[in-house]
Image (cartoon, grey):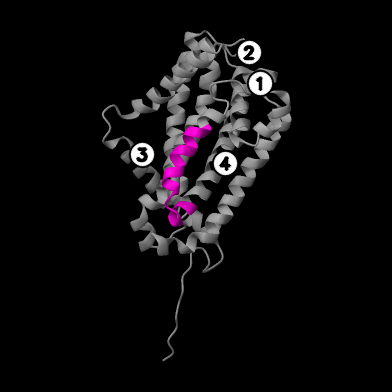
Amino acid sequence: MKEYDLTIEAGKLHQRYLKDLWMYRELFIFLAWRDILIRYKQTIIGVAWSVIRPLLTMVVFTIVFGKIAKLPSGGVPYAILVYSAMLPWQFFANTVSEGGNSLINNSTLVSKVYFPRIIIPSTCMIVSLIDFCISIVIFAGIMVWYQFVPSWKIVFIPAFLALACITALGIVYWVSALNVKYRDFKYVIPFMVQFGLYISPVGFSSSVVPENWRLIYSLNPMVGVIDGFRWMIIGSENSIYLPGFLLSLGLSILLFFSGFYFFRKVEREFADFI
C-alpha cells in the first residue's frame, strides 16, 4: 500500500481562497457576534461608551479649535463640523485598534484549525459599524439641537462608508499580519491611531491647509474620507479638494488590495510565529 503525504496550506489546496471566504461565512458571523458580546460584556455603562468618546472629543475640539484658535467653520456650527468628521474617524480608529491585534488575541484559533485567517481582522469592522450607527443617531440629535438641516447629498452615505471600510481594512490587513511576526506593532498601533487623529482634518477643516500643501496633505487617505463625509453632510462645494480626494481614493484602494495580497502571502506562516 502506498503512503501519501497531504499538505494543506491556507487557500492553496484548490486555489479558491475567495470561495473559501464564502464557505466560511458562518464563522465570520459567529466571530463578529462574539466580538460584539465581548466588547460590552463587562463594561459598566455598555454601549454608552460609543456615545461618550466621540462626544467628548467633539467638545474638546470645538473649544480648542473653534473657540480658542477661532478656525473657520464654513458658516456651520463648529460642533457639526467636528462631529461630521468624527463619524468616519471613530469608525476607522476602532477598526484599526481592534483589528491590528486580532490575530494575536485569537492565537489559539489560528494555530489549531484551517480557515481563511483574513476573516479574523475583518470581523472587527462589524463592531465598529454598530458604533457608527449609534453615532449617526447621536449626530441626528446634535443637528436637531443646532437646527441644522443636512445636505441632500447625505444619500451618498453608503458610498463614503464603503470608502471608510476599504481604507480601514487595508491598514488592518497590513498591521495585523506584521503584528504576528513583529510584536512591536502592538505598541505602534495606539500611537498610529492617536497621531492620525491630529494629522487628519477632524478638529478643523482641511481648507485651512495652504493650497500648495493640500495635495501632499492628501497622502493621508483619511483626508479624502473625512472631506467626503463633510461634503456629503454639510454640502459645501469647498469641502472637497478634488485632486486631493482622488489621490486619497487611489491610496485607499491601493492599501486595500496590497494589504489583502500581503496578508495572503504571509498567512501560511502565522501558526509558526503565534
On screen, 256 above or below 138?
below
Label 4 element class? helix
Task: Residue type at mark 1: give it.
Answer: Ser
Which badge, 2 or 1, is on the more N-terminal residue? 2
Q: Nearer the viewer, mark 2 or mark 3?
A: 2
Pointers 2 and 1 in contact (CB under 8 A)? yes
For this view, does 154 lie left or right of residue 274?
right
Q: Position of residue 64 (x, y in %)?
A: 49, 15
Q: Which numbered circle lies on residue 36?
A: 3
Per the image, label 2 sits on a secondary structure element best described as loop
Q: Is residue 238 above or below residue 122?
A: above
Q: Earlier in the sequence, mark 4 or mark 3?
A: 3
Q: CA distance from mark 2 to mark 3?
A: 38 Å
Which residue occupies the foreground of this view, 226 or 22?
226
Q: Compare marks 4 and 2 and give the one earlier in the sequence.
A: 2
User: Residue at (50%, 27%) from the top-left corner?
Assistant: 87
Tag 3: residue type? Ile
State whether residue 8 is above or below residue 227: below
Q: Are marks 1 and 3 in contact (CB under 8 Å)?
A: no
Q: Residues within 10 Å of mark 2 (few under 14, many from 20)?
A: some
Query: From the image, which quarter does the N terminus lie in?
Result: bottom left
User: Residue 46 in the image: x percent, y percent?
Assistant: 31, 29
For label 4, the residue is: 166
Residue 207: image tag: 1
Residue 264 lies, with reference to residue 163, above or below; the image says below
For mark 4, does the 10 Å Cα neighbourhood hold few (<14), some (14 to 19), or many (20 or more) residues? many
Classed neighbour count for the residue bearing mark 1: other residues with Cα under 10 Å, few (<14), some (14–19), many (≥20): some
Q: Which of the 4 image quadrants contains residue 208? A: top right
- Image coordinates for residue 122, horizontal then vertical, percent: 47, 46
Look at mark 2 in the image and give the residue it sits on. Answer: 74
Quick one: SS at disc 1?
A: helix
